[in-house]
Image (cartoon, coloured by chain):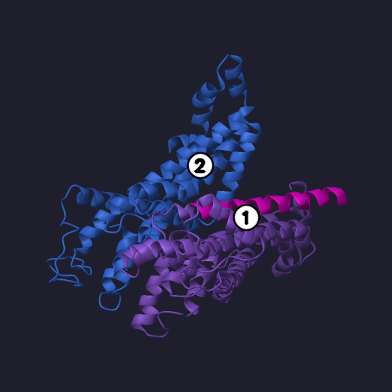
Chain colours: A purple, B blue
Amino acid sequence: MTAPLFTHSLRVTARMLFSIAAIAFVVFFLIRAIPGDITDLYVASGDLSAGQQARMRSELGLDAGVFEQFQIWSAQAMRGDLGKSLRFHTPVAAMLLDALPHTLTLTGGALLLGLVLGGLIALLACAFPAGPWRRCVELLNVWSIAMPSFCIGIIAVLVFSIWLQWLPIRGQLLMPIIILGLDVAGQVAKPLYEELMDITRRGFVRTARAKGLSGWKIVQRHVLPNAAAVVISLAGIIFGSLIGSTLTMEVVFGLNGVGGLTFTAIQGRDYPLVQAGITWLAISVVIINQLARMVSVWVDPRLRSIE
Amino acid sequence: MAGQRVKLSTWPWAVLAILLAAGLAATLGMTQDPYAQDFLARNQGPGPAHWLGTDQFGRDLMSRLMAGAWLTLSVAAGATSVALLGGAGVALAACMAGGWVRAAVFMVFDLLRTLPPILVGLAIMTAAGAGTATVIFAIGLTFAPLFAYIASAAYDRERLAGYTVAARLMGGSTLAVAWRHMLPNIAGALITQAAIVMPRAVTTESVLSFLGVGVAPDTPTWGRIIAAASEYAEEAPLSLAVPVLTLACTTLALSIIGHRLRHASRSSGGAAEATI
């Protein structure tokens, strides 16, 4: 058992490292393919003369060839040095750390709210098939598929910040967490409900029912442990798309998170910041996906044979 | 029950038909010029001259929305086609090549699928610059893995099916067998997937345009219209609400159509795929 487990974890780690390195590599060359670097932007806005531009370029190391730049950057990154922002002249790592709490609160809050809400509604729909909960599952699912979260964000700003003036337009986390949370709930509820119904049709549930257990007890004792694996792997998949919608939410609600930071950095051709931002977002998606896969295998040993 | 179902299932198609008609009317020049600026009539509410009002440059909102319907839908349709043909085509070719080629190609697809579409789109769009063709390619690329997995799963299933083996025994080349015998069999599944991807392509295009990296700056797609209107939300809330609701209705209608198709093809097995 130990030997296959060891080689398995080695293979998993290698695959993750490869993904991360590939993303960093692609992003590096992709952003440098954008016509015009930061000094061009300064020249265009009249802040820099042609002579100063050449000097600034060599100061920032932008006059070297792309491959040479990549060598320098990757050697630094290996030592944990992500470089300095071209625009703000502060270390990129510090800027990311400043932005991280916003993004983590937003993503974590939305994921938590969505999993709890979606899980609860799916459970209720399963435990009380006659009630209105099944409708709720369908409604939430359609809502999350059909309503782009940035649209809801804009409408929410219009209604709650401009008309009702309950919340500030920019810089608050309540509305984006609720909007993204509802989105996640819709993505969780439907597959979870289907899985739950599938489980209830199995033999052990029929046995429990024959023993005279109540509906809620059966769900709690027999169904829930079986559904946990599904929820966890779903959470891993949802996290990826959540990172994407977090970015738009940060722009719509003017939050200084990693997504918003990366977005403004792209517009300002701030290479080290873009590089660090996108790579960080991608790394978190890769790691969370892998974690979700590992935890669901741990929770549900039946999945081991598939891995 | 049956009557209710008919009533429910017609409205998404009606929405789609109205959008297409509106878009077609705009492209044929039957509306006001969506680019014509009128600085005396900026951020106006609805009125007889401009039925839905005007934007911050005094451009007619209704004709911009109608022109946007055509652009948004055609970009989404184009991106979906790119994803379908590219994803399924590359996947089938990789499957036929087999061995390390297949492994390498699917490693790339795995990587693409892991990343959020908006992030991939954003990176490509900033690198290649705003433009309609780029946005079609970028969105197509982000959704290509979904078709690739369907194609490879179908390939593995059909490869050993009786008719494939028979066709090969009769001397058909791999390519001919794939084209003549496999493709018709997986076409249904691919088209169903395309219907599901369509609304997501619409959303992705709108988000990219909203962020300012989608189609070229002046082009009236919904994302651009929404981005422009959101800066004047207080003065002209209607100019913001109308495009947002139009977009929401469109994605809603398209997703319902997509899910109906998937439901239909699932509940009656593979046979129903032909009727789509």
Q: Is residue A23 magenta?
A: yes
What residue sits 32% from the left and 71% below the top? B230
Provide the residue span drawn in magenta: A1-29
**Location of residue A284 by image quarter:** bottom right
Q: Are marks 1 and 2 on the same chain?
A: no
Check disc 2: other Cα within 10 Å, few if <14, some if 14-19, many if 20+: many
Name the spot of residue A303 as percent of width and height, x first.
75, 51
Name the spot of residue A41 as percent of width and height, x first.
36, 64
Q: Is residue B107 visible?
A: yes
Q: Secondary structure at mark 1?
A: helix
What amino acid type is highlighted by mark number 1?
Ile
Q: Name the disc covering residue A20, or none.
A: 1
Q: Is residue B148 left or right of residue A293?
A: left
Kindly identify which residue carries mark 2: B265
Q: Name the disc covering residue B107, or none.
A: none
Give me the chain letter of mark 2. B
User: Is B11 drawn above or below residue A53 in the view shown?
Assistant: above
Name the spot of residue A31 as percent of width and height, x first.
47, 56
CA gap between label 1 and label 2 equals: 38 Å
**Location of residue B49 by image quarter:** bottom left
What amino acid type is highlighted by mark number 2?
Ser
Comparing labels 1 and 2, the label whose residue is closer to the camera: 1
| Screen quadrant of the C terminus of chain B | top left
Q: Is residue B88 left or right of residue A122?
A: left
| Screen quadrant of the N terminus of chain B | bottom left
Nearer to the camera, A231 or B203:
B203
Q: Main secondary structure of the magenta part?
A: helix
Q: Is residue A195 magenta?
A: no
Q: Secondary structure at mark 2?
A: helix
Q: Is residue B114 visible?
A: no
